[in-house]
Image (spheres, rainbow, N blue to C red):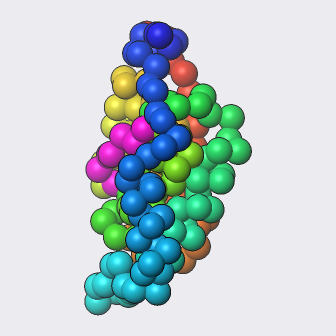
Amino acid sequence: MSNSHGAYALRVDRDDGIVDAFARLTERRGTDSLVVAPGGRATFSDVDALARAAAARIAAAPIESASLLGLAAPNGPAFLAGFLAIRRAGHAALLLDHTAPLDEVRRVLGALGASGLLACDRAWPTSDRDLRLSEVAATAP
């Protein structure tokens, strides 16, 4: 099935092995450290909470279901939570360089028919609002 960008529609199953495995790990090891760096420490539960909040925003957004969403975030809790949020909301993740110029990011998103972008400027977000969701305007092929 083709979309308005000429790309084929993505089929993303709600049963996602990565998301399911992370949920099981969080259940067993929620207070254990997942990411540790000189800048901070994030537990499985910390990342899970960020991911769930961002996934809820993605699910509530007027974004085509099972579409491609870009993710631009530095390595760390923001990247992990962003990836999980996109998958948890039932979308495929397009991993982008968070340091790329915005014009280039938009060009890539448009060329691949992505519906939106989840971005974060910092590896260690202070809240789920640091993970910004924006729609990608449809462009003519």
The quadrant in which residue 29 appears is bottom left
Count of residue discs: 0
Residue plotted at (46% across, 14% down) = 5
**Relative vertical location of residue 49 with respect to residue 31 in this rendering, above or below:** above
Q: Can residue 50 be seen in this snapshot?
A: yes
Q: Residue at x 60, y 28 (%)?
A: 64
Measured as percent of width and height from the top left, residue 110 is found at: 42, 26
The image quadrant where one finds the C terminus is top left
Residue 48 within the segment the image draws in magenta = no
Given residues 92 and 134, the one toward you in this image is 92
Pinpoint residue 74: horizontal percent, then vertical percent. Answer: 33, 63
Q: Is residue 61 above or below residue 132?
A: above
Asked whether, in this view, residue 49 is left or right of residue 62, the answer is left
Residue 133 seen in render = no
Residue 124 location, x and y as percent? 43, 75
Q: Which residue lies at the image location 44% right of the left edge and 46% below the top edge?
A: 16
Using the image, determine if residue 133 lies above or below residue 136.
below
For the stretch drawn in magenta, the main secondary structure is strand
Which residue sits at x=29%, y=89%? 38
In front of the other: 115 or 28: 28
Give the image location of residue 131, x and y in percent: 53, 60
For the record, the magenta segment spans: 92-98
